[in-house]
Image (tube, rainbow, N blue to C red):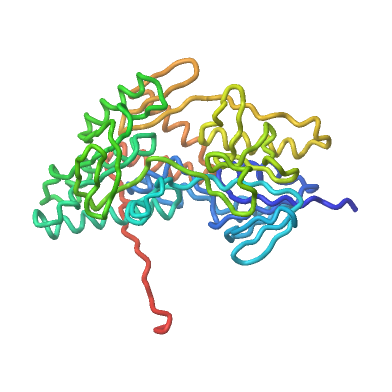
Amino acid sequence: MEIRDKIIVIGGGFAGLQFARQLNGKIDKKVMVIDKTNHHMFQPLFYQVACGRIEPSNISFPFRKIFQRSKNIQFRMTEVKKILPLENKIITDDATFHYDKLVIATGCKTNFFGNQKMENLAYGMKNTQEAISIRNHILLTFEKLIIERKSSDDGNWSIVIVGSGPTGVELAGAFAEMKREILPRDYPRMNFNDLDIILVSSTEKPLSVMSDEAQAESEKYLKDLGVKFISNDRVVDYDGDKVYLKSGEIIASNNVIWAAGVTGNIISGLAEDSLKNNRYIVDRYNKVQGFDNIYAIGDIAYMETPKYPNGHPQVANVAINQGKNLAKNFLKKIQKDWSPYEYTDLGSMATIGKHRAVVDLPKFKFQGFFAWYFWMFLHLMLILSVRNKLAIFFNWMWSYFNKDSSLRLIIIPNKKNKTEQ
C-alpha cells in the first residue's frame, strides 16, 4: 500500500481553504487543516457585522461542516506556536504534529506599527470576534448617550476610523448611514447631529490604491453622507479618550477603529532570512526560501515577480489563486511540470453607502448606482453556501426597502466565577 504524504495547512483563510478544497477527495493526499478558530470567515463583509447589518453566522463557515464528508481532510482547532523544520514538526497549544509538507496560510493581523497603547485601546477588524466587539462597543455607546445626553463624555460623540482603504471607507459610510437612517428611529428623543463620523487618512484622497476617478468620487460620497474626512494626517497616539494627530489636532473619542494597515501572522521557528516585510519569502511556486517542503500562500507570502517586484498586494484574489495553484501543483506527479504562479489583477472596488460604490476593472471604471449593484452581486456570489447567500440577500433587501435592520444585538458573555458553579 502506498504511503501518503501528510500535508499540514496552518490557517483556514482564503488561501488555506482554497488549497484544502482543491485537494478534497484526492485520497492519495492526507491533509490536516489547523486553525485557532473553528470557522472560515468572509472578511470583506466584517464591516457589515460591525455595523449590525448582517449576523456573524452569515459570513462564517465551520470547517467541520465544509469538510464533513471528506475522506482525506481532517481539521484540528488549536493555535500553532512554533515550527521545528529540522524535525518536520509543529508545536501547538495542545499537541505536536508531524508533517511531510507544510503549507503556511496564516494571513495577516492589524498592524498598529508598534504602538502598544493603540493596540490595547483601539479596535482592529481582522476577525469575527473583533467585528462583534466593535458592534457591541458602538451600540453600548449609543445606550450611554440616551441616558447621559449632553452630559455625556465628549468622546462618546465621535467615531474615529483610522485608515482610508476599502475597510475604513466602507465602515465610515455604514456608520454615517446608521446615524442618518437608523439612530433617529431607535432613539427618537435624541439629536444625533453632534455625533461625528471621522475618517483619518494619511493620503490626500481616500482609496489611494484605486484610480483617480474612484478616489474623487469616494471623497464626494463620504462628504455627502456627512463624514468628516481628515486628509494628509496621521494618528500618533491614543490614550483611550483622545486621539492625537501629527498635525497637532486632538479629537475626543472613546470609539476608535484602526483600519490603517496589516502585518503578517508570523510563526516562530523559521530563520530570519526567510522573512521580508514580515512575510515569508517564497519562489514562484510558493516554496519558502531555504526549505524544500515548506510553502507559504496568501497574505503571508512575499513573492517577487517582474510585474510585482515588491511583492503581491495582500488581497483575497491573490490568496485564493495561490492556494488553487499550489494544490494543482501538488497533484502533479513530476515537480518539473509545476506551474509558476502569476497574478492577474481583476480590479478592486469599495462601497460607501446605499447606491454609492466605486469599481475599477482592468478595462474600464465606473461609479455610483450600477457600481453598487455590481459590488453586491459579486460579494454575494463569493459567499460559500446557498443558505448563507439567501440569508445575506434577505437582510440586504430588507435594509434596502426599510432603511433598517433588526440585528443590533448587544451580546456580552457573562463572566461567571467558576467557584460559584
Q: Residue furthest front?
A: 273
Q: Is residue 352 above or below residue 242?
A: above
Q: Quadrant of residue 403?
A: top left
- Image x and y of residue 89, in percent: 71, 57
Counting from the top left corner in percent of width and height, residue 44 is at: 44, 40
From the viewer's perspective, tell me whether residue 67 is left or right of residue 153. Answer: right
Image position of 323 (left or right of 62): right
Q: Tell how many labels.
A: 0
Q: Position of residue 265 (x, y in %)?
A: 53, 49
**Residue 365 sits in which quadrant?**
top left
Image position of 293 with respect to 214: above or below = below
Side of 271 relative to 407 (left or right): right
Residue in front for this viewpoint, 48 or 344: 344
Closer-to-camera residue (325/184): 325
Left or right of residue 16: residue 403: left
What residue appears at the point 62 percent right and 62 percent down from the top-left corner?
A: 92
In which image quadrant can residue 219 be found?
A: top left
Q: Nearer the viewer, residue 44 or 383?
A: 44
Look at the image and tell me in which quarter the C terminus lies: bottom left
Q: Tell me which residue sits at (71%, 42%) in the image.
A: 290
Q: Residue at x 36, y 56 (%)?
A: 120
Q: Residue at x 65, y 37 (%)?
A: 282
